[in-house]
Amino acid sequence: MRKMPWNDKKTYNFITKTMFDVIGCKFGSIGVVAAIVAGLKKYHTELVIDLVDMVVEEVRLGLENELEFGLNQRRMTYAKFLCELYIYRLIDSQLVFDTLYLFITFKVKTDPTKEGEDKKEEVKEASKDDKVYAIEEVEDNKWTLLFRIRCVCQMLDTCGRYFSYGLYRSRLERYLAYFQQFCILNQPLPLEVDFIIDDTLEKLSGKGKKGKLKRLDTLEEVAEEIKVIEERWAEQEKRAHRDALPIREEEEDRRSCEEDEDENEDVEADDSDPDEDAGGDGEVPGAEYPERISRWTKDDERFMEDFDNLMKCDIQLNNENPLGAWPL
């Protein structure tokens, strides 16, 4: 693929469209496409940027047009493709978590009980045709929410193992608490969806009792879990902010010390200049090399005096006999 004429705009658009059209390949081979994109990242960064933008936009459009059930497989495919891009380090974890939260918050009512009661009252007052339409609308909304749960479980099955340890563990637990709240608010769930959620939590659970993720059954348990997680999250942020303050102070102290040293060097340089200018002809040989001044002794001074006298005698003889022979 690197031998193709990438400078040609039509060729570049064709490659981008082909890489984006993962719906045409097998579901298990989506990771291969992500691997190819990762290999081209070093030579064509703009291809990765365009692909990521197109995938994120496709996921968003899928949530806006949920009632088109014929495109459900397409939405699931691009959700998995986004996670495969994360596995090959083409996107960061923040984009993955933003997409996961988007599935459980986009166009979701905060209080579904009141909404259901209002719909029942409207159905009683409406005609038979309106009753059928209202019931179908409620069922469609429920099936769209169930499909969101499937997409979330698919994304966690694809790249969730990379969030099961280290610093990402707390972010994963926080999301799972809100995800289980979303599932409880949309009960009753089909058995198939229940089994999918249980399998996902089991895959994300680590070794031992501490690493095991438990399934929450009531809103009270979810509220307590969210409260504990949010308190822990706030403590971590305070601790990170507290740890960052000494680092900033140390950096400021280091910068101030460096500035003081630079000022002292400038002052010393200014003080040394007048002494050098005042020395004139009486300057000690070797003064331009401070490390050599300590080596100058009295014998060296006596040698320089004798050498100067010898040179003066030589110059005087040359002046007296410019064309004559040297005296014997």
Image (cartoon, helix red, strand yellow):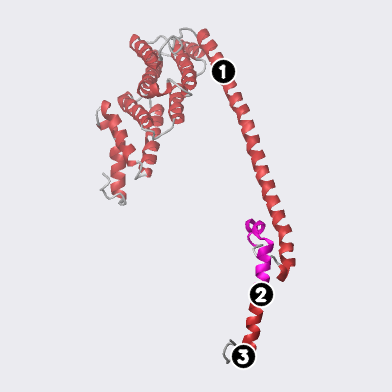
Give the Cα separation between the discs numbered 3 and 1.
Answer: 103 Å
Could you tell whether 45 is left or right of 36 in the image? right
Examine the image and state in which quarter residue 149 appears: top left
Give the Cα separation between the discs numbered 1 and 2.
Answer: 86 Å
Q: Position of residue 130 (x, y in %)?
A: 40, 16
Which residue is depicted at the point 43% across and 28% down?
A: 96
- Report helix, strand or loop for mark 1: helix
Could you tell whether 180 is left or right of 313 in the image? left
Q: Position of residue 110 (x, y in %)?
A: 51, 18
Q: Nearer the viewer, residue 199 or 53?
A: 199
Q: Position of residue 216 (x, y in %)?
A: 46, 9
**Residue sitting at the far front:** 328
Disc 2 residue type? Asp
Q: Is residue 166 visible?
A: yes
Examine the image and state in which quarter residue 67 appears: top left
Magenta segment range? 288-306
Q: Label 3 neighbourhood size at 10 Å, few (<14), some (14-19), many (20+)?
A: few
Mark 3 in CB contact with mark 1 (< 8 angstroms): no
- Report helix, strand or loop for mark 2: helix
Circle 1 residue? 232
Q: Is 20 contained in the magenta span?
A: no
Circle 2 residue? 308
Q: Quadrant of the N terminus?
A: top left
Could you tell whether 88 is left or right of 97 in the image? left
Disc 1 residue type? Arg
Task: Say whether disc 1 or disc 2 marks the residue closer to the N-terminus.
Answer: 1
* Main secondary structure along the magenta-highlighted residues: helix
- Report helix, strand or loop for mark 3: loop
**Residue 321 disc label:** 3
